[in-house]
Image: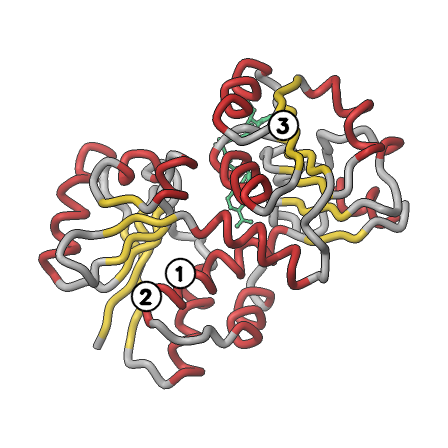
């Protein structure tokens, strides 16, 4: 039996186990997906131990995504984002990857959104970094708006052609945007939005990384203008799809994974 899992703290409410186990069942793979909650100071032992025990792959979430970067051999994208959410133990040294970026790109692709023109990324934390690099790597003109404006400037300095702003710039930036990503936690478990509703428009495609609730205020207000809306479940699904494909070398059963996820969101 193969073992995969998720390293984070807390992880008890994670939707990844049912999503990945649905994929193993659909593909006839004898595997389990297990959650692990090491103490912060034990993260290095956890990676070394997982490798020694023959665990095939781990996803990584808060608060370990940055720490794990230094403990594995990161690929170029994970190194630029500065965070690892997927570890592959199949080589001599564990390798680190960031499938949140693939999650962003493939969520848009699933909804037939062309990634060209201007993208506004709201947020400069882990999800914001993944979105900014993912969209800039596709050739989009990326602008980043963040509550702490220095973080937006710092990220913009690292992303090709990007500019950084405070949230007050959204009023001027969003009307000209083709794509908008909310990569802040605003809207999570609360009916709030970081984006002024009057700036939203029908030519916009909006991805909200937040998936609790699945329909956020931002998505509701965007849909009312005729914009294309993409909930955070799609990003979550496709980061898992990309991890499954990396670990198993097989096409992921996207529909089965999505069904398992949506049943629990
Ligand atoms: P993070 O690294 O802690 O970053 C949080 C971001 O939210 C920062 O930009 C922060 O701004 C901003 N923020 C927090 N509270 C705010 C407020 N009251 N007003 C304005 N901005 C605020 O977190 P993260 O890992 O990037 O996650 C962000 C969100 O994305 C979470 O809801 C998470 O669940 C979601 N996410 C979803 C997926 C998915 O697959 N769907 C994947 C990853 C993350 P400051 O810099 O000013 O603090």
Whether residues under marks 1 and 2 lie with C-beta atoms below 8 angstroms apart, the answer is: yes
Q: Residues within 10 Å of mark 3 (few under 14, many from 20)?
A: many
Question: What residue is disc 1 on?
Answer: 243
**Residue at 35 percent of width and 38 percent of height:** 79
Report the mark closest to the observer, 3 or 1: 3
Where is residue 171 shown, x and y percent of the image? 81, 23
Depth order, front residue of 119/168: 119
Q: Is residue 102 above or below residue 112?
A: above
Quarter of the picture holding the N terminus: bottom left
Callout 3: CB less than 8 Å from ligand 1: no
**Residue at 54 percent of width and 31 percent of height:** 160
Quarter of the picture holding the C terminus: bottom right
Depth order, front residue of 120/9: 120
Question: What residue is disc 2 on?
Answer: 247
Q: Earlier in the sequence, mark 3 or mark 1?
A: 3
Where is residue 248 shown, x and y percent of the image? 33, 71
The Cα–Cα distance between marks 3 and 1, rounded to whole angstroms, is: 27 Å
Is 120 on the left or on the right of 248, as rendered? right
Question: What residue is disc 3 on?
Answer: 144
Label 1 sits on a secondary structure element that is helix
């Amino acid at each position: 039996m193969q073992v995969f899992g998720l390293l984070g703290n807390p992880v008890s409410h994670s939707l990844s186990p049912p999503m990945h186990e649905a994929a193993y069942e659909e593909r006839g793979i004898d595997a389990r997906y297990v959650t692990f909650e090491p103490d912060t100071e034990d993260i290095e032992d956890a990676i070394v131990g997982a490798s020694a025990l023959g665990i095939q792959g781990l996803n990584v979430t808060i608060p370990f995504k940055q720490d794990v970067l230094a403990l594995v051999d990161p690929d170029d994208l994970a190194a630029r984002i500065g965070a690892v959410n997927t570890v592959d133990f199949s080589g001599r040294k564990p390798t680190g990857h960031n499938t949140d970026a693939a999650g962003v790109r493939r969520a848009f692709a699933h909804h037939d959104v062309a990634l060209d023109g201007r993208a506004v990324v709201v947020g400069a934390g882990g999800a914001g970094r993944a979105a900014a690099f993912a969209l800039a790597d596709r050739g989009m003109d990326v602008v980043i708006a963040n509550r702490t404006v220095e973080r937006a400037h710092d990220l913009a300095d690292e992303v090709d052609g990007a500019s950084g702003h405070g949230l007050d710039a959204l009023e001027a930036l969003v009307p000209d945007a083709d794509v908008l990503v909310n990569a802040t936690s605003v809207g999570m478990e609360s009916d709030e939005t970081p984006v002024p509703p009057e700036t939203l428009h029908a030519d916009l495609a909006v991805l909200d990384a937040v998936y609790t609730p699945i329909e956020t205020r931002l998505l509701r207000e965007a849909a009312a203008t005729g914009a294309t809306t993409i909930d955070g479940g799609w990003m979550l699904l496709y980061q898992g799809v990309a991890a499954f494909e990396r670990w198993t070398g097989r096409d992921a059963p996207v529909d089965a994974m999505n069904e398992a996820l949506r049943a629990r969101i």
